[in-house]
Amino acid sequence: MRIKKLQIHLRGLSLNERLRLAREVGTSYAHLRNCGYGSRVLATQHCVRIEELTQGQITRQELRPDWSLHWPELRKLPKSRVKPVADAS
């Protein structure tokens, strides 16, 4: 599953900012990039950290199609707060 929002966010950062984001998430920039292109899946703890570091610009729900299995408490949010999964192309 391609995560277009993650790709766009990464493109908007300088190389140093990309590397710092990856370090703060607890992974490598290459892994984040691969997840953005859909060739890898982000670990749940990385999704939470990305949501925190981007101040909600990218949410867990957008990063994992199976988000409701990992964070069932988010199902209780109003539908306007639960964003659809990113572009699957």
Image (tube, grey):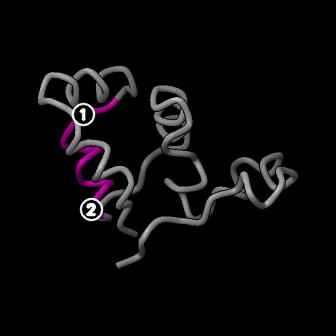
- Horizontal side of 60 relative to 46 (left or right) equals right
- Front residue of 83/38: it is 83
Residue closer to the observer: 57 or 46: 57
Q: Are marks 1 and 2 in contact (CB under 8 Å)?
A: no
Residues in magenta? 27-37
The residue closer to the viewer here, 57 or 19, is 57
The disc label shown at residue 37, or none: 2
Q: Residue at x 22, y 24 (%)?
A: 17
Number of disc labels: 2
Q: Is residue 28 magenta?
A: yes
Q: Position of residue 8 (x, y in %)?
A: 29, 51
Amino acid beneath label 2: Tyr
Is 78 located above or below residue 30 in the figure?
A: below
Distance of label 1 from label 2 (alpha carbons): 15 Å
Q: Secondary structure at mark 2?
A: helix
Vertical arrangement, residue 40 with respect to residue 23, above or below: below
- Residue 52 x, y percent position in the rendering: 54, 28
Element at badge 1? loop
Tell me the quadrant of the picture where the N terminus can be found.
Answer: bottom left
Identify the residue at image location x=35%, y=67%. 2
* Residue 28 drawn above or below residue 65: above
Magenta stretch secondary structure, dominant: helix
Task: State the residue at coordinates (46%, 32%).
Answer: 54
Place of residue 89 in the rendered image (x, y in percent of width and height, measured from the top left): 34, 79
Whether residue 67 appears in magenta in the rendering, the answer is no
**Left or right of residue 14: residue 88:** right
Residue assigned mark 1: 28
